Image (cartoon, helix red, strand yellow):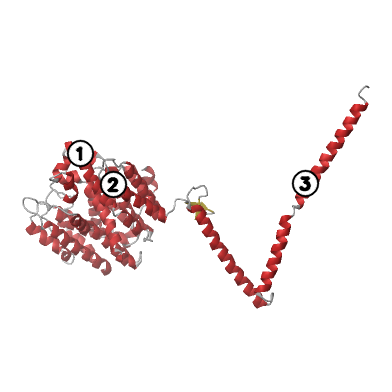
Amino acid sequence: MIHFKIWRDARDITDPKEYATTGYDRPSMRKCWEFLDRASRSFAMVIKELEGDLARTVCIFYLVLRACDTLEDDMTLPNSVKLPMLRSLYLKLHEPGWNFDGSGPNEADRMTLAEFDVIQKEFSMLDERYQLVIEDICMKMGRGMADFAALATPEKPVAEINTMADYDLYCHYVAGLVGEGLSGIFAASGKERAFIANQLTLSNSMGMILQKTNILRDVKEDVEEGRGFWPRAIWGKYGFDSMKELLDPTREKQALFAASEMTLDALRHATDSLDYLTLIKNQSVFNFVAIPPVMAIATLERCYMNPNVLKKNVKIRRGETIQLILRATNPRDVALIFRSYARKIHQKTARDDPNLLKMSIACGKIEQWTEHHYPSFLQIRMQNGAITTVIDDNSSDGRVPLFHRISKQIKDKQDEEKREQWVAQMVDKGIIKSKEEYLEREEQRKRVREIEDAQPFPWLIVVGAIVGFIALIVAISGVVYYLVAVTFKDA
C-alpha cells in the first residue's frame, strides 16, 4: 500500500498540461470530476488513468449511466414518473439546462440528476463519434430498465426476477451494455482497433461478471431495502419461498448452496472476459478493463461458501486490492490471477454441495483456458535487456519433448531453405556448376568427418603415450628396486 501510494506514477488530471484533454480548467468539467469521485472512488481512479481524452469521455459516459441507474434504484419514485424518464433520459442529453430534483433524499448519486445540466454541457463538447455511442447505450439501458421496472406492483415495488433468461437480460441492460459502450468508445478513439466495437458477446461478458458479482455480494443489503435480484430459478430450488428467507440463520447451509449456484453462474463469463483482454493493445485501456474482472473473481472467491455474505457486505482487503491492481497489467498475469482464484474456489467446494460437479467444470475451464494460452512449461525471462520466452527443461510436462521436436523440425526446414538459396546463388555466380556438384562435395565432406570421428582424437594418443611411458618407468623402477633388495639382502 505504501509503494502504491508513494511510487505509483499516476496521471494528475489537475495538471495544467493535461487541461487540453481532461477539461479540468472548465468549472463544469471540474464538477463532473467531483461527481465521479463521489459516485465511485475505485472507478474514478482507473478512469483518470486513461490516455488523452478517453478519461474525460469515459467520465461523462459513467455519469450519464449513473443518472440512469439512480432513477431505476429510487424506490420513492412512482412508475408514472420513473418509466417515462428512463425511456427519455437519452433525449435530455441534447436539452441544455434540464435537471431533475425529485429523487429521494437518501439516493447517494442524486446529484447526477439534480445537476444533470452540468453533465449535459460537457456531453455536448465531446466529439460526435463519442456522443453517438453514449446516446445509443443510454437509450437502450433506459428502455431496458423501464421494461423491468414496469413489472413492479404496489405490493412488490421491485419486480421479481424469475428465470435465468430474465436474470441475464436484466444484467445485460444494467451492465452488459456498459461493456458494449466502452468497446464502442475505445474503437472510436482510435486507441483500439475498430473491430473491438463489434465484439458484443465478449463486451457483454465483461459487464456481466462484474454485475453478477455485485448482486451476489450485496444480497443482504438488497433484501433489507426491498430489492431482490437473485433469480427465483436459483433460490427457489433450495426450498425458499422468498429472498428474505435466505437471511434466516437456521437455513444457512441451503442459502450457501444457493449462493454457490450464483457464483457458478457468474463464473460462466470468466473465459469470455479473458478472451476480451487478449484483444486490447493500448496499455491504459487494458489496465482500465482488466481491473474490474480481476476484482470480481477475487470477490467471488471471498464470498464463496462464506456465511458472512448473508450477514454483511463482504469485500476483499485493501492491500489485496492494490496488489491485484499492480499485477493486472497484461493478459498472462490476469489469466494466472483468474486461475489462482479458481483453484481456491474449487478447494472450498463442499462435498454435499449440489453444484460440486458443475463448479469443478467451471473452475477447470478457467484452468484449461490459461494453460492453453499460457502453457506452464514456458517461462518468461529477461535476457540482455529483452523479455524472452524459454522452455522449462525441468518440467515434467509431456509437451516439452514435443515442443523441442517441432522446434527442431522448424529449424531444420529454415536451414534447408537457406542452403537452397545459397546454392542457387553459387550456381548463378559460376562458382559451382550445379546443385548436384554441391551435394556430391557435401557427401565427400560427410564421409571424411565420419572417418575422422571413428579415429581416436590426437590428444587421446598423446595422453595414452604419456601414461604408457610413466607406467614403463614405474615398472622398471620396481624391477630395479627388487633386484637391489635381493642382492643386498644379507648386507
Q: Nearer the viewer, residue 472 or 181?
A: 472
- Indicate the secondary structure of the residue bearing disc 3: helix
Q: Earlier in the sequence, mark 3 or mark 2?
A: 2
Q: Earlier in the sequence, mark 2 or mark 1?
A: 1
Q: Which residue is mark 1?
A: 252
Q: Amino acid at mark 2?
A: Leu
Where is residue 268 shown, x and y percent of the image? Answer: 28, 53
For residue 61, above or below residue 463: below
The residues bearing labels 1 and 3 have C-alpha atoms spaced at a distance of 83 Å
Residue under the image location 23 percent in, 57 percent down: 175
Q: What numbered label is drawn on residue 463? A: 3
Asked if residue 9 can be seen in this view, the reply is no
Q: Which residue is mark 2?
A: 300
Contact between labelled residues 3 and 1, with CB atoms less than 8 Å apart: no
The residues bearing labels 2 and 1 have C-alpha atoms spaced at a distance of 18 Å
The residues bearing labels 3 and 2 have C-alpha atoms spaced at a distance of 71 Å
Q: Earlier in the sequence, mark 1 or mark 3?
A: 1
**Disc 3 packing (10 Å; few <14; some 14–19; many ≥20):** few
For residue 155, above or below residue 85: above
**Disc 1 packing (10 Å; few <14; some 14–19; many ≥20):** some
Apparent side of residue 6 relative to residue 448 in the rendered image (left or right): left
Q: Amino acid at mark 1?
A: Glu
